[in-house]
Amino acid sequence: MKIVLLSGGSGKRLWPLSNDARSKQFLKVLRNSEGEHESMVQRVWGQIASAGLGDHAFIATSKPQVEMIYNQLGSEIEVIVEPERRDTYPAIALAATYLYSVKGVSLNETVVVMPVDPFVEESFFHKTKELDQVLNESGADMALMGVKPTYPSEKYGYIVPQSGTAHDAPYMNVQSFREKPREEEAAVMIEQAALWNCGVFAFKLDFIINILLSHGLPIQYDEMVKQYDKLTKNSFDYEVVEKANLIVALPYEGDWKDLGTWNTLTEEIATPLIGKGIISDSSSNTHIINELDIPITLLNLSNVIVAASPDGILVSDKASSPMIKEVMKHSDQRPMYEERRWGRYRVLDFLKYPDGKEVLTKRICLAQGKNLSYQYHLLRDEVWTVVSGNGVMVLNDKRFPVKAGDVLVISKQSKHSLLAETEMDIIEVQTGSELIEEDIVRLAFDWNEIIEICAV
């Protein structure tokens, strides 16, 4: 059995901490067993490993999230990268071709697809192992896993079983799906043994491969990448699940939450204050999550979320916080904070002059033992000031040591990289006509490979 975790999201529902590069699954606001902050994706990946499924798991994601995944989970993680964002059906189709043509997975092997960020106990992942047996016993095209509801919620979709299904059935044939019904309708469906749809589905690999063949689409991964824009931009639920001939569902009885809004996320945050700030004793059910160095003080306000990051500041009644997705849907602000496989950076200042010249200032933190890729830029010059730490710089194939106090001038098309021997803080000032993250031509990632290039 193989597991494909879908890591998507545009980062609007938990603004300003989340953005297009840092969706909700990457926010380090939960606590692990050691009391340290961890993200949803770190929590889920740890649970998958504990359930004995780590060696069989892959993450399907878009290009903007790859660096964040490597930063939080390590560069050994096997990531399947979409050439562009096109919804869950194209993402799963691409993953299927990767498993088939790159990994050599048998067409008869079960593939389980699920979101990367469910808030569940480890038993949830042990339960997914039963999906393989359910598929074999039922002969169904697909097997879903649904959560037994604890109350008639209007927030979730429902898997409705065929009439007469017993509540204690080991699995059930699916009749239909209902998305976010009214509370009264949800109560009736629960009486009929309906399950919350938690976005987990399983199929034999040949089921998806045959669908691709029937549409004249490639089943070789390299070719699918080239033709990715030909895939229908649609959700997997609408494009595949609802068209399947026979679907069964496996009930899971346990805690399950979608921490997709500030009011649901803060229910699972162990402390009301993360970062610099003060909350008065007269406030209740109030949270401050502050990534800035400026303290926030909150007096006599209850049921409020205050979230602050380099992207902005949100002050909202918790019940109204889901509105932020609609309010921010047209925002095209560039992310002001990102995590990369080598560390992280924060934008400190950005100016655009009337003549079109742009100046952007960043604070870069390069983790000990990590290095930047060997790269050059076409549209900008850079000046680096090393604030702390020491390392080894490569500039136009020449190597030399750098330390706190050094100033480095990197002009357009100059090839450069940096290895941090200790953790390093650098202030980077970019100047140019268009200061975008995409203005990077990467020549190599691995430090040993970079050294070999310089030795030639």
Image: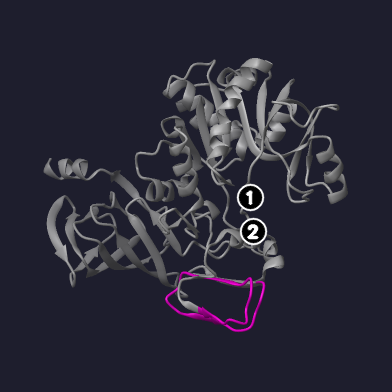
Residue at 28 percent of width and 44 percent of height: 443
Of helix, strand and loop, which one carries label 2? helix
Of helix, strand and loop, which one carries label 1? loop
Which residues make up the magenta segment?
278-303
Main SS, magenta residues:
loop
Name the residue type under label 1.
Answer: Asp
Locate residue 378 relative to residue 138 in the image: left or right.
left
User: Hey, which residue is sitting farthest bottom in the picture?
Assistant: 299
Q: Quadrant of the C terminus?
A: top left
Locate residue 447 relative to residue 256 in the image: left or right.
left
Disc 1 to disc 2: CB gap under 8 Å: yes
Whether residue 229 is visible, yes or no, is no
Q: Is residue 267 above or below residue 112?
A: below
Locate residue 174 relative to residue 418 in the image: left or right.
right
Q: Which residue is mark 2?
A: 264
Viewer-proximal residue, 397 or 172? 172
Q: Is residue 108 above or below residue 299?
A: above
Q: Which residue is mark 1?
A: 258
Q: Which label's residue is closer to the chain start, 1 or 2?
A: 1
Queried whether the magenta region covers residue 300, the answer comes back as yes
Separation of marks 1 and 2 at Cα, in angstroms: 8 Å
Residue 278's tag is none
Locate residue 395 relative to residue 179 in the image: left or right.
left
Q: Position of residue 299 (x, y in %)?
A: 60, 84
Viewer-proximal residue, 281 or 226? 281
Queried whether the magenta region covers residue 293, the answer comes back as yes
Viewer-proximal residue, 235 or 161? 161
Q: Position of residue 160 (x, y in %)?
A: 79, 34
**Few, some or many residues within 10 Å of mark 2 (<14, 14–19, 20+):** some
Q: Position of residue 75 (x, y in %)?
A: 35, 43
Q: Is residue 343 above or below residue 231?
A: below
Residue 280 occupies quadrant: bottom right
